[in-house]
Amino acid sequence: MLEVRHLDKRFGPIHVTRDVSLRLEPGERRVILGPNGAGKTTLFNLLAGELAPDAGAILLGGRDITAAPVAERARQGLARSYQKNTLFDALSVAENLGLAAAVATGAARSILRDCLAMPEVRETVREVAARLHLSPHLDATVSAVSYGVRRQLEVGLALATRPRVILLDEPTSGIGPEMAHGFHHMLASLPRELTLLIVEHDMDLAFDVADRITVLNYGEVVFDGAPEEARNSAMLKDIYLGSWENA
């Protein structure tokens, strides 16, 4: 479904992404791990089209999207959430979801249009809210809900575009253990036709959700394999200074 071939990116003399290759099958849950500075967010920026690679190729469903702009990638079924919230704080949770759904389908040409007046948009909002346990918050403004609900809404915006692949950049960042556990359950419950690529520091999520784990270090893929292989890798324990001994 999503394939990366020999992807390279430099910022001046700094080689941030080095010859990265990976392939996700339809419906796969892949977690990308790596210490700070490993190049994980840069890789996501390349996949989403926010950065152009210096070398390599990106394919979505067999189609080369290496040079495609962000909007075209979204139309082809690639969605992304961010480490930091990118929401309309003055709008309600329902309006945020409605805008994502309407813009993705081309039904809305202006953010001033009442997207929720469209039946197909309302249906998408209801479906996404129910799946992510956002239904009780639909009428609340984003500025009034908790940080954890905002993190759920970030995932909701991606889902509302009806994607084939979602890039989730540290979805549990900044939330407590109890809500993180709920996130694990929520991600695991997403439909299997949806392909997930997740950047995480949360080892529990990595081992609970992933079908496969890819580890970056200094911009290079140093491991790619099953969670159990990762758990038993002495090299990866060294990279993480033993932080997943009890994972």
Image: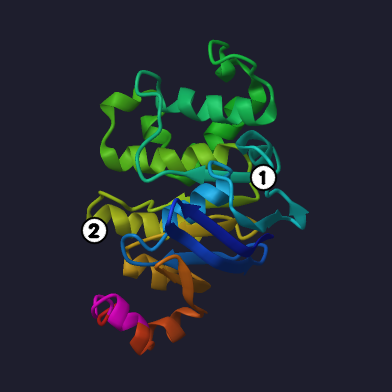
The range drawn in magenta is: 236-244
Judged from the image, the secondary structure of the residue bearing numbered disc 2 is helix
The N terminus is located in which quarter?
bottom right
Judge by depth and name the residue closer to the eye, 42 or 173: 42
Q: Residues within 10 Å of mark 1 (few under 14, many from 20)?
A: some
Q: Residue at x 65, y 50 (%)?
A: 164
Quick check: 187 above or below 123?
Answer: below
Q: Quadrant of residue 99?
A: top right
Whether residue 241 sits left or right of residue 69 in the image: it is left
Residue in front for this viewpoint, 18 or 173? 18
| CA–CA distance in space, label 1 to label 2 | 31 Å
- Magenta highlight on residue 136: no
The residue to which callout 1 is attached is 77
Return the x and y of residue 2 as percentages of the image width and height. 65, 59
**Residue 214 appears in the figure:** no
Measuring from the top left, give residue 89's x and y in whole percent.
35, 23
Give amino acid for label 1.
Answer: Gly
- Residue sticking out furthest to the top: 112
Q: Residues within 10 Å of mark 2 (few under 14, many from 20)?
A: few
**Rendered location of residue 146, percent (x, y):** 26, 36
Residue extending furthest front?
13
Residue annotated with mark 2: 177
Query: Would you say residue 242 sits in the magenta stretch?
Result: yes
**Numbered mark located on residue 156 in the image:** none
Label 1 or label 2, whichever comes before in sequence order: 1
Task: Name the side, left or right, on which 213 lies relative to 139.
Answer: right
Of the residues shown, which amino acid type is indicated by label 2?
Answer: Pro
Q: In which quarter of the image is the C terminus?
A: bottom left
The residue mark sitting in front, 1 or 2, is 1
Q: What residue is rendered at 40% in x and 67% in y?
A: 218
Residue under the point 57% across and 44% down: 79
Q: Nearer the viewer, residue 94 or 66?
A: 66
